[in-house]
Image (cartoon, helix red, strand yellow):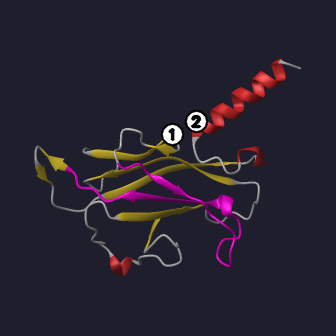
Amino acid sequence: MRLALDSTYNDFYGAQDYPVVKYLRRPLYFEVELLYSRDPQAELFLENCWATYSADRNSSPKWDVVVDSCENSADEYLTIFHPVSSNARVLFPSHLKRFEVKMFSFTSGRDALKGQVKWSVGMGVLYHNAWFGLLCKQQIVTVLKSLVSWNENI
């Protein structure tokens, strides 16, 4: 997972740029890429993405921005998924996911915690072109239910 400078996803922060400082509610543009695959039938499937206040990805406090491949409906500032198109850098758009979240701060009571927010992502790979373009697991479940219903009507 890497952080783009802006919504064009053309330029990214390098190791020398960290920690990146952002103001509250300013957008962060993340890109997750399936590396080392040349299989056009593969699609990257984002399962979860979350932020923690500690380098330990299982620590608390924790805030989910992607839950079961969908935006976190409990978040006032919903995650925005951006489409990926082929270009000189992107051979297989299905191998990338791009999304935007608003910068936030963890709090303790009424006080903002000072420090860095750490980001983590859980992902998988799907190998069937029927799922291409579906960003949300709920959409996949809906498609599967439709296929089962269609088969039962035959």
Q: Which mark is residue 138?
A: 2
Q: Is residue 121 left or right of residue 75?
A: right
Question: In the displayed structure, does residue 14 sit left or right of residue 134?
Answer: left
* Residue that lies at the very extreme toward the left in this rendered image: 110
Reply yes or no: does residue 82 show up in magenta: yes
Q: Is residue 1 visible?
A: no
Nearest the viewer among 59 and 29 is 29
Q: Secondary structure at mark 2?
A: helix
Residue 120: % across, % down: 41, 54
Residue sitting at x 68%, y 79%: 88
Distance of mark 2 from mark 1, alpha carbons? 8 Å
Viewer-proximal residue, 144 or 55? Answer: 144
Horizontal and vertical percent for residue 125? Answer: 64, 50
* Other-residue count near label 2 (Cα within 10 Å), few / some / many at <14 / 14–19 / ≥20: few
Q: Is residue 36 above or below residue 153?
A: below
According to the picture, the residue beneath numbered tag 1 turns out to be 68
Tag 2 near tag 1, CB within 8 Å: yes
Q: Which numbered tag is attached to residue 115? A: none
Residues in magenta? 77-106
